[in-house]
Image (cartoon, rainbow, N blue to C red):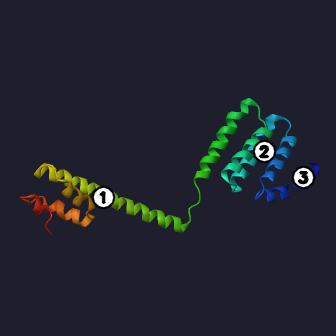
């Protein structure tokens, strides 16, 4: 262990791909900070680094459990550690989004808004049909729900002058 204490930078570079390097780092920190009251920051720093190494979530979770066991804290410091790790976890959820992902998300949101408008317009038109002409048949309901927004808008205006249900669907 003494040999690794002098090679901390080497351990950090190995930790990028090897969780055992992180465990050696944890053991070194546990030995260095024997007074449990001084362990909070070193323990948190190891966990923070662990999050950035990009390990599989299961491997990261197991490694974190071992760090937690190896670098024990006094009971009164545990809540502070839990708060710090929780905040770190929330930061981790805000992952970097590439420009391509932003475009795809933007397009998906726009598409979702259009679909929502179409569904809303269809339900509104069906409600107007029911109020004006009575309950709609399954065929009419299907026709309205399958229509495009432009068509639904036209039909919604047609209902204002329609004397019969067929007049609603004229072009």
Q: Which mark lies nearer to you, 2 or 1? A: 1
Residue tagged by mark 2? 42
Q: Residue furthest top?
A: 76
Quadrant in which the C terminus is drawn: bottom left
Q: Residue furthest right?
A: 2
Q: CA distance from mark 2 to mark 1?
A: 53 Å
Circle 2/circle 3 CB separation < 8 Å: no
**Image location of residue 48, percent across then percent down:** 71, 49
Q: Residue furthest front?
A: 138
Which residue sits at x=66%, y=42%? 84
Residue tagged by mark 3? 4
Q: Earlier in the sequence, mark 3 or mark 1?
A: 3
For numbered disc 1, what is the local secondary structure?
helix
Q: Earlier in the sequence, mark 2 or mark 3?
A: 3
Q: Between 126 and 3, which is closer to the camera in this rendering?
A: 126
Residue tagged by mark 1? 117
Which residue sits at x=21%, y=63%? 153
Q: Earlier in the sequence, mark 2 or mark 1?
A: 2
For numbered disc 3, what is the local secondary structure?
helix
User: Is 93 positioned to the left or the right of 129 in the image?
Assistant: right
For numbered disc 2, what is the local secondary structure?
helix
Q: CA distance from mark 3 to mark 1?
A: 63 Å
Quadrant position of residue 32: top right
**Image location of residue 7, percent across then percent down:** 89, 56
């Amino acid at each position: 262990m003494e040999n690794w204490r002098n090679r901390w930078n080497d351990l950090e570079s190995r930790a990028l791909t090897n969780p055992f390097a992180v465990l050696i780092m944890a053991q070194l920190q546990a030995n260095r900070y024997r007074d449990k009251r001084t362990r909070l920051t070193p323990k948190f720093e190891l966990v923070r680094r662990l999050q950035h190494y990009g390990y599989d979530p299961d491997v990261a979770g197991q490694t974190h459990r071992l760090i937690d066991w190896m670098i024990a804290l006094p009971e009164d410091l545990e809540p502070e550690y839990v708060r710090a790790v929780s905040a770190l976890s929330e930061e981790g959820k805000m992952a970097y989004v590439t420009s391509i992902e932003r475009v795809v998300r933007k397009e998906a949101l726009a598409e979702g808004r259009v679909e929502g408008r179409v569904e809303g317009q269809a339900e509104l038109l069906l409600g107007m049909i029911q109020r004006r002409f009575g309950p709609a048949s399954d065929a009419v309901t299907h026709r309205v729900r399958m229509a495009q927004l432009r068509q639904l808008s036209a039909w919604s205006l047609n209902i204002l002058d329609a004397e019969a249900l067929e007049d609603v669907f004229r072009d």
